[in-house]
Image (cartoon, rainbow, N blue to C red):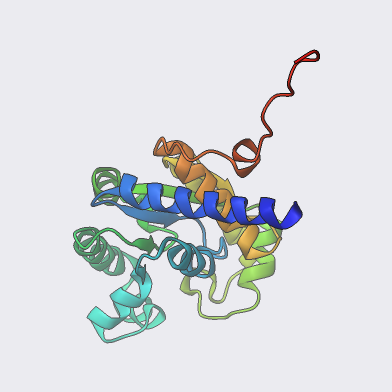
Amino acid sequence: MASILAEQKKDDRKELLAEIRAGLGNRSIVLIGLMGAGKTALGRRLAARLDLPFVDADSEIEDAAGATISEIFTEHGERYFRQGERKVIARLLQEAPQVLSTGGGAYMDEETRANIKARGVSVWLKADLRVLMKRVGRRDHRPLLAGVDPGAVMRKLIEARYPVYAEADITVESRDVPHELIVDAVIDALGAKLGCKAKPAAQKAAKPGRRKKGR
């Protein structure tokens, strides 16, 4: 019986994934959130589950500029970087459907937010300060954290950006748990947002009612 339920659950998830892909149409799933929220790691897994391309906006910006983001910040400043970021994301949104991971400051741009709203379904991966600091501490390529107190910077970014991130279509907590659990939560939230009708496996496996006595 357990194996039958497992297979039914697997089939139900496949049905839900298919309905999400259909429900997206020509829109992208756009992941937003602060550095360390897990947009790239979770985005790759989400794209694989949905059988969609995964695109990292930061990598696309670096390819277009022929320089790393840190180099762009150092040589040209943040304003110049944001202008290029806006153009690259606008171009990428034309190539839907896909799972698109964006930089932490991208959604703060009003024009970019409007483009995402028109051509995508935005998913805010919301993480608390403890989780963010644990993750960003593993890497040293973050230009906004260079040469400063990372904790203080992250607190200021949370204060400034979280009220704007809250405009996203979907919010999912990015917790310190295995990635697949967060991906499952994103999939369930997408299914609900897109009005997918796939039934839970438990409901499909429900037994027929008992026959009345005396029959």
Image position, residue 143 (x, y; %):
47, 74
For this view, does 83 lie left or right of residue 155?
left
Looking at the image, how many numbered discs can be counted on the residues?
Answer: 0
For this view, does 92 lie left or right of residue 56?
left
For this view, does 96 lie left or right of residue 200?
left
Q: Nearer the viewer, residue 131 or 45?
A: 45
Q: Nearer the viewer, residue 23 or 3?
A: 3
Using the rendered view, name the quadrant where residue 131 is placed. Answer: bottom right
Residue at horizontal 23 percent and vertical 79 percent from the top? 64
Residue at horizontal 59 percent and vertical 39 percent from the top? 204
Using the rendered view, name the quadrant where residue 79 is placed. Answer: bottom left
Image position, residue 160 (x, y; %):
49, 46
Image position, residue 95 (x, y; %):
21, 63
In the rendered view of the protein, which quadrant contains the C terminus?
A: top right
Residue at horizontal 58 percent and vertical 49 percent from the top? 185
Please say if 38 is above or below 140: above
Residue 83 visible? The answer is yes
Q: Residue furthest front?
A: 215
Please say if 209 is above or below 92: above
Image position, residue 75 (x, y; %):
32, 81
Q: Nearer the viewer, residue 170 or 78?
A: 170
Q: Residue furthest top?
A: 214
Q: Nearer the viewer, residue 141 or 11?
A: 11
Residue at horizontal 24 percent and vertical 58 percent from the top? 93
